Image (tube, rainbow, N blue to C red):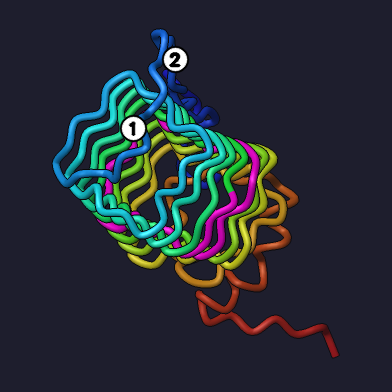
Amino acid sequence: MARRAAGGGTTTVRAARRPELRPPPLEPYDGAELERDGDYDGLEFRETDLTGQDGGGARFMDCAFSDCALDEASLTRARLLDSVLTGVRGVGTQLAEATLRDVELVDARLGGVQLHGAALERVLIRGGKIDYLNLRRARLKDVVFEGCVLVEPDFGGASLERVEFVDCALKGADFSAATLRDVDLRGAAPLEPARGVDRLSGAVISPAQLLDLAPLLAAELGLRVLAPE
């Protein structure tokens, strides 16, 4: 039986399961424009410009995206399965209600990615920088953010289970109405929640982070902190 911590939780946190990818030999993508509800299996998209293309509802299975442009690409309700995205870049990529399962996103440079309502399971996001990541009402299970910079990510109303932040900058995060379970924030530096500090129940933080968060927690509780006269 796990011991209880002072905050009412256990002294351990369940680790996220990472994707285990064994990609088959890949065929080069022929460069044709994406199709809605298309099927793409075992393909390599290398330095492909997908700017503004519409692949809504498409399925990408055992695919690799390397140094691709994703500006304003529409992949709403797309399914990315057992795939790796390396060095992708773009602004306004639309992935609302998409499914990402067993996916690695490596060294991405993205801004305004729309993943609201999406489902992420066994996803590793390593390196790179993502500005204004929209994960409102998304479901994250077994997701690892490692060595990346997240600027003003929005987790509002999202469900996070077994999510880890490892050597990751988390700036201006919004956790409003989010639900957290076994979320490990100890590797987030800095850890700067802008909103929703009251929703961090279910997360694990370090003693140093607790000191940093003390002013926000005091404000949330309506405490005034005054030096003795």
Query: From what the image shows, is residue 187 above or below residue 153?
Result: above
Tell me, for residue 20, which label it has, or none: 2
Main SS type for the magenta part?
strand
Residue 151 at what x, y percent from top left? Answer: 59, 62
- Toward the viewer: 106 or 116? 106
Which residue lies at the image location 54% right of the left edge and 66% below the top edge? 152
Residue 76 at what x, y percent from top left? Answer: 23, 53
Residue 119 is one of the magenta-drawn residues:
yes
Tell me, for residue 121, which label it has, or none: 1
- What SS does tag 1 mark? strand
Which residue lies at the image location 50% right of the left edge and 32% below the top edge? 46
Q: Quadrant where the C terminus lies?
A: bottom right
In this view of the protein, can residue 140 be seen by the observer?
A: yes
Mark 1 is on which residue type? Glu
Give the farthest residue toward the bottom.
Answer: 229
Circle 2 Cα neighbour tier, 10 Å, few/some/many (<14 / 14–19 / ≥20): few
- Toward the viewer: 162 or 53? 53
- Toward the viewer: 147 or 142? 147
Quadrant position of residue 59? top left
Mark 1 → mark 2, Cα distance in angstroms: 12 Å
Q: Which residues are magenta?
A: 109-132
Query: From what the image shows, is residue 2 above or below residue 71?
Result: above
Q: Quadrant where the N terminus lies?
A: top left
Quadrant position of residue 226? bottom right
Residue 47 is one of the magenta-drawn residues:
no
